[in-house]
Image (cartoon, helix red, strand yellow):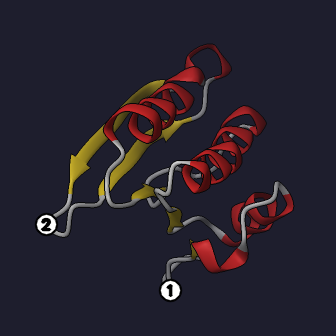
């Protein structure tokens, strides 16, 4: 991600929240995938939440990474949820195979 930060924190309820910040850049797109795989295979938290509130758009690689993380999380009994994508991004995420009930759009975004 161009000038990006991938913030990872643990919430009070034991969920791990991954929050990418900045615009997508294919050169560093593997950061999100790497973090998701590490969390799901090694850490195995209660749940993983991918917070997209500060990302205007995801490149196709990251959309696929989040969709694959949902399947991998199911295999390891760690549910993956996506929070606050834009309306168009919600459509792309669900088209990539993420169940709509795992995507919660932000009420203040189009």
Residue that carries the numbered disc 1 in the rendered image: 107
Q: Residue most toward the left?
A: 12
| Residue 6 percent coordinates (x, y) | 37, 34
How many numbered tags mark residues here? 2
Q: Which mark is residue 17?
A: none
Identify which residue, 44 or 29, lies in the foreground.
44
Of 61 and 3, the residue lying toward us: 61
Q: Residues within 10 Å of mark 2 (few under 14, many from 20)?
A: few
Q: Relative to residue 49, is residue 103 drawn left or right?
A: right
Q: Is residue 21 above or below residue 102?
A: above
- Horizontal relation, residue 97 to residue 32: left or right: right
Element under disc 1: loop
Q: Is residue 77 above or below residue 21?
A: below
> Residue drawn at (58%, 22%), measured in percent from left and top?
30
Provide residue 103's location: percent of width, then percent of height.
60, 72
Helix, strand, or loop for circle 2? Answer: loop
Q: Is residue 86 above or below residue 64?
A: below
Q: Which quadrant of the figure contains the C terminus?
A: bottom right
* Residue behind mark 2: 12
Task: Report x, y in % for residue 90.
Answer: 70, 67
């Amino acid at each position: 991600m161009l000038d990006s930060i991938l913030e990872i924190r643990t919430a009070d309820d034991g969920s791990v929240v991954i929050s990418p910040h900045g615009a997508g850049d294919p050169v560093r797109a593997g950061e999100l995938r790497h973090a998701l795989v590490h969390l799901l295979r090694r850490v195995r938290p209660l749940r993983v939440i991918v917070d997209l509130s500060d990302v205007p758009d995801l490149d196709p690689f990251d959309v696929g990474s989040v969709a694959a993380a949902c399947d991998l999380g199911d295999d390891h009994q760690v549910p993956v949820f996506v929070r606050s994508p834009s309306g168009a991004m919600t459509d792309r995420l669900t088209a990539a195979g993420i169940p709509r009930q795992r995507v919660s759009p932000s009420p203040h975004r189009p």
